[in-house]
Amino acid sequence: MAIECLVLGAGQEVGKSCVVVTINGKRIMFDCGMHMGYDDHRRYPDFSLISKSRDFDHSLDCVIITHFHLDHVGALPYFTEVCGYNGPIYMTYPTKALAPLMLEDFRKVLVDRRGEEEQFTSLHISQCMEKVIAVDLKQTVQVDDDLQIRAYYAGHVLGAAMFYAKVGDSAMVYTGDYNMTPDRHLGAAQIDRLELDLLITESTYATTIRDSKYAREREFLKAVHECVAGGGKVLIPTFALGRAQELCILLDDYWERMNLKVPIYFSAGLTIQANLYYKILISWTSQKVKETYATRNAFDFKHVHNFDRSLINAPGPCVLFATPGMISGGFSLEVFKQWAPCEMNLITLPGYCVAGTVGHKLMSGKPTKINLDKDTQIDVRCQIHQLSFSPHTDSKGIMDLTKFLSPRNVILVHGEKPKMVSLKERIQTELRIPCYLPANCDAVHIPSTIYVKAHASNTFIRSCLNPNFRFLKRSKEDNSDQVLRNTNPTAPLQVNDERVAEGILIMEKGKKARVVHQDDLLLMLRQKKHDVQFAYCCAAQLDNLEETRNRDDALGLSDKCSSLQLLFKELSNYFSGVNIQDLGEHLQVESFHVSVCLKDNCPYRIIDNSQREAVTVYFCCSWSAADEKLAWEIISAMERFNLIDNLPCRNSISSTN
Amino acid sequence: MEEGEQTYDFAVNNCLDMRKRQKILKSLICAQPWYKTPNNLHLWDPSSIDLVLISSTMGMLALPFLTQTKGFSAKIYATEATTRLGQLMMEDLVLMHNEFHHFFGSDSGSPQWMSWEELELLSPALRQVALGKDGTELGGWMPLYRSADVEDCVKKVQTLKYAEEAWYNGTLLIKAFSSGLEIGSCNWTINSPKRNIACISSSKFCSVNAMEFDYHALRGNDLILYSDFSSEGVLTNDEHDNNFSASTTYNSSTPSADNDDLILKECLLRNDESLEEREKLAFICSCVVDSVKAGGSVIIPLNQLGIVLQLLEQIPVYLESSAMKVPIYVISSVAAELLAFTNIIPEWLCKERQEKLFSGEPLFSHSELMKGEKLYVFPDVHSPDLLTNWQEPCIVFSPHWSLRLGPVVHLLLRWREDENSLLVLEDGLDTDMALLPFKPMAMKVLQCSFLSGIRLQKTQPLLEMLRPKEVLFPEDLREQIKFSGSHSFSVFYYAENETLGVPRSKDSVDLEIASNLATQFSWRKLDHDDVDITRLEGQLFIDHGKHQVLSGNKVSEMASRKKPLLHWGVPDVEKLLTVLSKMGVKGSVERCMSDAESGSDEIVHIHEPSKALIEVRATRTVISARDEQLASLIFEAIGNLTGGI
């Protein structure tokens, strides 16, 4: 099985976000957006790539919408009501509440103002929304027996979420749009440390690093305050939802603090009604705003009133929120015509305006005149303030999130290609994670994680949890370092507890695989364990034996011990790093045992050494197959040894001690 | 590991001072209230509790008693909504209690009524309240926690959303699912590698404000701990007549999805419950309207938030339809915040309420009623705003249902002699005792019971549908429900203060093996049947309840090692010689009887290609050779003649 990621929109561009991911056989569509820059078929994602027969119910397991912006949800009514998708659709509670307002607003702009043929009707919108299942943050939704999804706070707009999806052993996250720093009305994106095969992240600001949003908020407030203090009027063109409430929270709070009495108006298109949604959904905002619910809900704006057309030319300063955001028509354009010619007034512009709109014209350079059509020309003398706080993460945020999640693969969407290329380089070189930036209609294939499933016996699990101590000698350099030795008087042993899982995997026809301890296997087979061991009685040369005997003034036992100790010393020098244990009667390395052999006729004394000239000591060795390699190394070494009882050396050791 | 599941009963007692029997009123109201937790909770070692799961706000009120105990360090889980509402209720209780001190002063140390001289004077009924049935429960009474204890307690609670995954210790997966009882109330599932458990507390199929009872999420667990005690001692005639025939009807031997649907439709989701509840509310509303029409006031000290919210919406409708203009007051220190809170939690409410969000209306109408000056909210009876606004007749919602604390005491004393006034009480309270200090009363009392759990006749169909292997059922309900014979699960009965051991269900653990390890397996066939075995070596990781063997540091070593490490059976020496000779190794056998115990030793002397020796015993074979390759060959030959891995 593998993961296939088919990008239908927002591939190397911003607009009509739509990614279809097939993960262990389950197919999920993330976002179903619309491109605001096109009027033709390019406006929608090419859904035919999902299913040639356009049988979407069977080719998709669910649709997930991350937030209510049109480039993420705009094509949904078209997809469900016109293309006929009837399967489950998931979005957060705020998205489900606010998306229909956005869609309806957009539909009206298309039909009423541009006079276009409508792509979907109001009825389509409400029928589409009825199919939507609302989810809470962190709520683990079982879409079916295998597919699990979960929303995490994304901080982009109210209700924006990143979505986690898991099928079997494979898992992924689709971020949608997100913001890694909190602002005045929303918190920062928040996600658990998840084990992921794939992260699909937006990359709007792939190369930009931005300073704090608070500074830009202050600039905005200063500009507005200066304007109204000078008796001017402020026009704030916005969409009905999101930015309007965010700016309004700023202004309402500022008005309160500065004790300003200048009226703030909402134009009819916006209606204060929209604020009601924000009031109910206040728990999805930042901690500070959230806490206001008990005393006075922060979206219960004190200084905001409904606007009346007759107020356009009323004397005195005011602030007006009006739709649409890019001054592409409607009420904001109507007011713009009246207010633009006066120097005292101020127009704020959103961060992004589609080409062709008045907003776009105002953004590009400082025009003094704007031609609306052949006959209408407007003198622009007012001040213009561009709002530059966009609720997207910057490149640092993208890198931080990617590093935090450490997915096995990263796919970048929702950005501009040159910037995405440089971000991709960073992810691959700095984080060493493979990164892709597919174009629209391209598919990326990556492997998915699969585990072999088995039952494990309790004995096996217990044996895995047993401590497995290894005593490693400090290396020689450590010992020679006198300073270190004095300051660190610990034993020259390092204790390691590297637990190893050792067991036996059993596959039986028609049964689930089992992992057992070897004792379990013998029980199962009703067999007794049969040890197969190796043994060898090894001859070693021992010089100065006489001297040793004299000094120790002992026979048999002490002789035995001292030759074993000599061997111990020699082996320890030779195999530094290997932990050789001196257990008195014998030495032990793993399963390798060696003891002095006093038998005259040891059966394991395979090679006849009687011709040897020097005095020989026999060491009887035994080991099991696991340590075969080591055992032969030790035996070869022992045969080469010339064990010399080095008296001065011994003294020197005791004197240093 | 121990899983401590504690539900807290809560009792208020302050009605014990009977020094002057003739002055019942004064003594019952003026006695310093102490409080009680579940019996014998104080005998528990708090440090032995690992985990506390809170299912509802009512199940949280005694939590500070536990969290302030020395040595308590358990992890506490509760839903966000339960925690918030529970905190408000506890704060309210503390404030009411402090107000009591303010009015009546406080005894130092334990209250006077707890001294033996005073207890001797009590009526038998009161004495039983104070001492318990067998006279041992006097030690269970405790003074109330302070506001700081509440704050500290709430800080220790880890709050969850419905269906949020919480990992306890990396091994237990804990999730809360809506129980439909109250806003935020929940049932729990605990998934461990060995067993999956669902804990069902009081749940409601016909939730009114709270999110619907999510029983689907409880399906497929191994064990169900059934702890809905709401039906204890409640057995209506109706239920007697039916004799739970419902439960037997649907017991087909093979559970199927169709059968589940049938159970659901015909039994569990029958809307008779919600119909009944609606009728009860309608009746209360009409009684309320009757009282105010007659010029009397109404006091409603109900405890269930869901019922209060419904009445707050319905009473104004009834008033309007009978053209009455009577103010409704909600008097409680936390009322304003509580009502504001209910309007910002669509995620915790039922479908109908959520629809209000989607159509842009407030979730509850009380905010509109307040704007329309039909509903007033005051923190207490002597707040200046209340005094300027006060009008009678009026309708008042205020705590406390025990009638011993809070604004209700003052208002009852004011209206008790008015025969047109009305007190709405919840059933299950000892009314005589509760009203004792206010007697004689001319005021009308309406006592009503609301459904607060699963009806007994629905218990078995529900359990059938959830398909557990085992059910732990309260001993106290054993007499009231006879599980019909054909049920698919085994039932264990548990009782208070007794530890019940449940047999182990799974003897094995599910293990996941990394695929890069799996590619290195070298399989061996066992000769007798279709069994393949291989050695598995890696590092075991236990995380998120999963046991995973991933490749450790020693993988390369393992890959190079193909030799069996474990042998079984005894190699036949003659066969060994044959095998060896095929390998070009020649030798001869020597038999020697060494010990009587170990049986015969057989020794094979190898002459070619070089000298070696093989000792074959019953449990051990020793290969002795100087030549590494020869030793290896012999080892291989033995491996062919014994089982090995």
Image: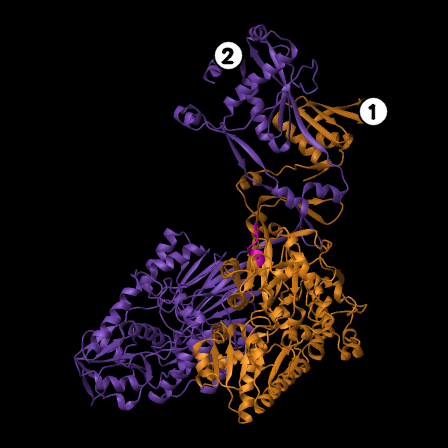
Chain colours: A purple, B orange
Answer with left or right where residue A318 lies relative to residue A36: left
Marks 2/1: CA distance? 47 Å
The x, y position of residue A537, in whole percent, is 65, 20
Q: Main secondary structure of the magenta part?
A: loop
Q: Height in image: B593 above or below A161?
A: above
Three-letter code, disc 2:
Asn
Q: Which region shows up in magenta? A: B65-72
Q: Report the front residue among A123 and B468.
A: B468
* Subunit ID for the residue under disc 1: B
The x, y position of residue B632, in whole percent, is 64, 30
The answer to whether residue A490 is visible is yes
Q: Residue at x 21, y 75 (%)?
A: A384
Q: Residue under label 1, please give it.
A: B596
Q: Report the front residue among B558 and B175.
A: B175
The x, y position of residue B502, in whole percent, is 73, 55
Q: Residue under label 2, please give it.
A: A646
Residue sitting farthest toward the right:
B596
Q: Residue at x 51, y 72 (%)?
A: B347
